[in-house]
Image: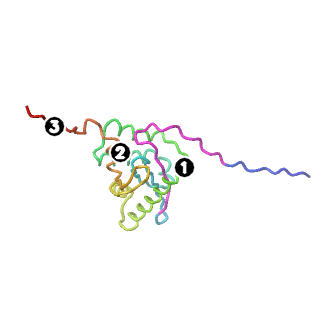
Amino acid sequence: MQREIVEAAAPAEPPEPALHDNPLGEWYGDIDFIDRQPFVLLINAATGLVLVLPGRAEHLRDIEAIAAGQLWMLMNMLGVGGALADAEVDAWSRTQFARTTNRSMVASMNQRKFEAWTQFAYNERTAFETAQRLLETPFSRMELGRGFHFAADLVRARLQPADRIIPMQASRTPH
């Protein structure tokens, strides 16, 4: 009797996502646990903006809508609105997922997960309160240049409508 060895097919890799067309660019995410409760942390590569969301199965089914809602509330809190902000929120309806090989982003995400964990454990903050706190938490990333950055400032700089920026007036010359 001859036996055939059947190899289990390796799970297919998800296809590479299409190029992003949202104003803030790429987002990265991961799931972590605090006291056996899952939470999802999403971080924007361009600004360091962090979304902290519940991570149970019923929440993961609607993760795009939940992320868009928290993003909208954070931008509203920052006073950021207009077409670019709306486009960023709307882009969550077209989310694509893929594995990342960006080690720098993984390290940044791990640092932010630790910061979120401490906010949950020691300060008893909710997911949204933790996301608010991380807006004003300084961070550094080589891709953003030297020194420390604040997500709130970077989000405002990228999404603030140009008509809300007050231009400097040229100095008057004496007659």
Residue 38 percent across, percent down from the top left: 48, 59
In primary-sequence order, the first of circles 1 and 3 is 1
- The residue singled out by tag 1 in the image is 100
Residue identified by numbered label 2: 72
Q: Amino acid at mark 1?
A: Thr
Q: Which of the 4 image quarters holds residue 21?
A: top left
Would residue 21 be counted in the magenta stretch?
yes
| Kind of residue indicated by mark 2 | Trp
* Most distant residue in the bottom direction: 122
User: Please, what is the three-letter code of the amino acid marked with disc 3?
Assistant: Ser
Q: Quadrant of the C terminus?
A: top left
Q: Is residue 39 left or right of residue 135?
A: right
Q: Is residue 107 above or below residue 15?
A: below
Residue ID at (76%, 50%): 7
Q: Earlier in the sequence, mark 1 or mark 2?
A: 2
Q: Nearer the viewer, residue 38 or 82?
A: 82
**Residue depicted at x 43% and y 63%:** 117
Give how far across and how far down residue 125 sits, in percent: 36, 62
Q: Quadrant of residue 122?
A: bottom left
Q: Give the CA distance from mark 1 to mark 3.
A: 50 Å
**Residue drawn 20% across and 39% down?**
168
On the picture, is 166 further left or further right than 154? left
